Image: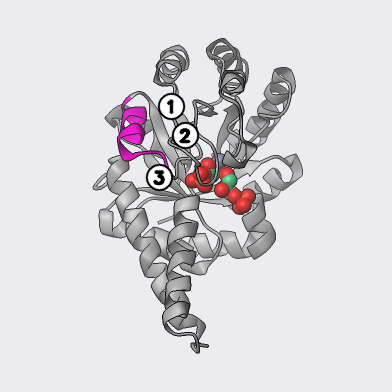
């Protein structure tokens, strides 16, 4: 099956109250694991490549590997640029076949974020490519943000209305208490803010930094309007954790397939688990 636009997947998820997992892909084994997990769960899936992933693997390699995975499966697969901040690179992704791009202007003043998001939409829309934008600052767990400063980073519902009205964006990443990377304590999500934003903008919302968020909190966020859940750190933990285990048990192993094969299996298992939590099993 050809790559599908993320918006098509999210509109259905929004109607039927589940979320589609967006899993970060950095190499062939992780791409294979993501598609295998989606097949086993009969679920739609989003593979996303960050700018770091593109620097590591190369744009054409990422895009061709994901297209090959999509062409050889019956489940819907989307290829999405994660946290794109460079307009030129975003355009290159679109022309190399990505079915969705995120423009992350969250560090810019609102007006600038709106202006560049609109420019991206002008290119993407006629080509049937979806666009995700971000409002509010998601941050990293390494940022060590003081509780009183948290609110200032969260997505402002009034700004969200302005942003959606002025851009016409169809999916929005919001900051409601999650952070990228491994959490030090338990994240506390601002469900009231999520409810208010969803009611106001009525488009599919995206949760970033979802690794380490308790399952029940993720499910509640989905019930309140989150339709795309981003997972990277849990994949890194599973993949590299299994490699470490294999090498600890077999310190003389030199065959990469004997190390990467089990890592791929461990990745299938964690992604299947996430797909079940997100409620997208049998929604392919
Ligand atoms: O949102 C961030 C993702 O975990 C991607 O991380 O930029 O190191 O590839 P990365
Ligand atoms: P985690 O690494 O915290 O799961 O975040 C992933 C993410 O938000 C990618 O955009
Ligand atoms: Zn993110």
Look at the picture and state if 222 lies above or below 82: above
Residue depicted at x 47% and y 33%: 206
Going by the image, does 142 lie left or right of 201?
right
Which image quadrant is residue 187 in? top left
Where is the N terminus found, in terms of image quarters? bottom left
Q: Which badge, 2 or 3, is on the more N-terminal residue?
A: 3
Badge 1 marks a residue whose secondary structure is: loop
- Judge the density around disc 2: few (<14), some (14-19), many (≥20) Cα neighbours within 10 Å: many
Q: Is mark 2 within 8 Å of ligand 2?
A: yes
Q: Is residue 280 visible?
A: no
Disc on res. 189: 1
- Does label 1 or label 2 sit earlier along the sequence? 1
Tag 2's secondary structure? Answer: strand
Coordinates of residue 47 in the picture (x, y in percent): 48, 52
Crowd class of label 3 (few under 14; some 14 to 19; many from 20; radius 10 Å): many
Residue 108 % position (x, y): 73, 26
Residue assigned mark 2: 207
Disc 3 on helix, strand or loop?
Answer: strand
Query: In percent of the image, x 68 and y 44: which residue is there?
Result: 90
**Residue 217 in magenta?**
yes
Tell me the magenta residue range.
212-223
């Amino acid at each position: 099956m050809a790559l599908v636009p993320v918006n098509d997947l999210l509109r259905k998820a929004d109607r039927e109250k589940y979320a589609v997992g967006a899993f970060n892909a950095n190499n062939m084994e992780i791409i294979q694991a993501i598609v295998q997990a989606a097949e086993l769960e009969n679920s739609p899936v989003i593979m996303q490549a960050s700018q770091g992933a593109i620097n590591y693997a190369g744009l054409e390699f990422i895009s061709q590997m994901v297209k090959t995975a999509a062409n050889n499966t019956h489940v819907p697969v989307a290829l999405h640029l994660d946290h794109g901040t460079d307009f030129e690179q975003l355009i290159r992704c679109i022309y190399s076949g990505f079915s969705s791009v995120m423009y992350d202007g969250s560090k810019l003043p609102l007006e600038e974020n709106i202006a560049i998001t609109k420019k991206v939409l002008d290119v993407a829309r006629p080509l049937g490519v979806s666009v995700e934008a971000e409002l509010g600052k998601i941050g990293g767990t390494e940022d060590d943000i003081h509780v009183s400063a948290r609110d200032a980073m969260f997505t402002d519902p009034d700004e969200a209305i302005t942003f959606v009205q002025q851009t016409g964006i169809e999916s929005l990443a919001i900051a409601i208490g999650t952070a990228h990377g491994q959490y030090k304590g338990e994240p506390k999500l601002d469900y009231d803010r999520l409810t208010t934003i969803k009611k106001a903008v009525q488009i599919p919302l995206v949760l970033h930094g979802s690794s380490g968020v308790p399952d029940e909190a993720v499910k509640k966020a989905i019930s309140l309007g989150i339709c795309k859940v981003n997972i990277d750190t849990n994949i890194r933990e599973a993949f590299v954790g299994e490699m470490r285990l294999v090498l600890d048990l077999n310190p003389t192993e030199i065959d990469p397939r004997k190390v990467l094969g089990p890592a791929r299996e461990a990745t299938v298992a964690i992604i299947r688990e996430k797909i079940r939590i997100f409620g997208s099993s049998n929604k392919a």
